[in-house]
Amino acid sequence: MILPYLAIALLTLATVYSAIVSFRQTEGAAPSWIFPTSASRPTRIIVGSVGLALLIAVGLWLGLGARHHGLRSSRFLLPEGYTGWIRVEFEVPGATPLPLEGGEYVLRIPADGVLRTSSAERYGWAQDHYYYYSAQGMRSLQDSGDAPLIWGKINGEASGASGKRKYEEFFVGTAQQFKNQTRE
């Protein structure tokens, strides 16, 4: 998340430095690649300032655009005790769209592990959350760390009798259960 801002800061710093260096008048210096020998100091300052202002404007535009168009995270709700593969099929005609609660898409996975939705598949970085649900409430599943329960998350596209289908799959279970499933 911070990497784009770091890159913009580095570019701004390099631009300011090169502008300062190019504004210095040195006796007998070769003409710069940007300004002809006859360019006056005020011309150099104006061109450098306009260039810097444009760079800052582009950086702000990209930064604000990224903040307003970020990918929403998903909340996967799995039946209590479920282990096995989960499959979410996107853009299924006649299926219900994914609901949005608290700024997250909510994916309530049925007991068979396959959820079909008319919503489009989303790409990009987002922090997804995984929970078991039951009549007593919800409890969080660990998706990283010492004993993760989420494995092998992939996105793909398959063709079949009903046409092309975009999907997302992942495995829910222990490391050993995942290894056993991938050997079969």
Image: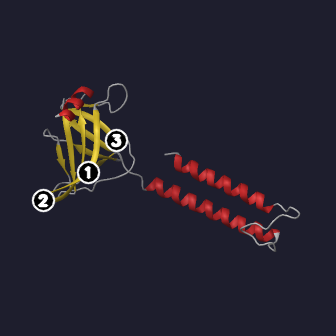
Q: Earlier in the sequence, mark 2 or mark 3?
A: 3
Vertical side of 89 occupied by 132: above or below = above
Residue 146 falls left or right of residue 48: left
Q: Earlier in the sequence, mark 3 or mark 1?
A: 3
Q: Are marks 1 and 2 in contact (CB under 8 Å)?
A: no
Sort mark 2 into few (<14), some (14-19) or many (20+) by Cα contacts within 10 Å.
few
Position of the C terminus, as image quadrant, is: top left
Q: Position of residue 35 (x, y in %)?
A: 75, 70
Q: Position of residue 41 (x, y in %)?
A: 82, 68
- Report which residue position mark 1 lands on: 156
- Report which residue position mark 2 lands on: 162
Identify the amino acid type marked 2: Ser
As helix, strand or loop, the secondary structure at mark 2 comes to: loop
Question: Could you give the CA–CA distance between mark 2 and mark 3, rounded to whole angstroms?
Answer: 29 Å
Would you say residue 67 is visible in this rendering? yes
Residue 25 falls left or right of residue 157: right
Vertical side of 43 occupied by 179: above or below = above
Question: Could you give the CA–CA distance between mark 1 and mark 2, rounded to whole angstroms?
Answer: 16 Å
- Report which residue position mark 3 lands on: 128
**Residue in the foreground of this view, choosing between 98 and 12:** 12
**Residue in the foreground of this view, choosing between 141 and 100:** 141
As helix, strand or loop, the secondary structure at mark 3 comes to: loop
Would you identify the image quadrant in which residue 22 lies?
A: bottom right
Disc assigned to residue 58: none
Would you say residue 98 is visible in this rendering? no
Farthest residue to the bottom: give it: 38
Q: Position of residue 31 (x, y in %)?
A: 79, 68
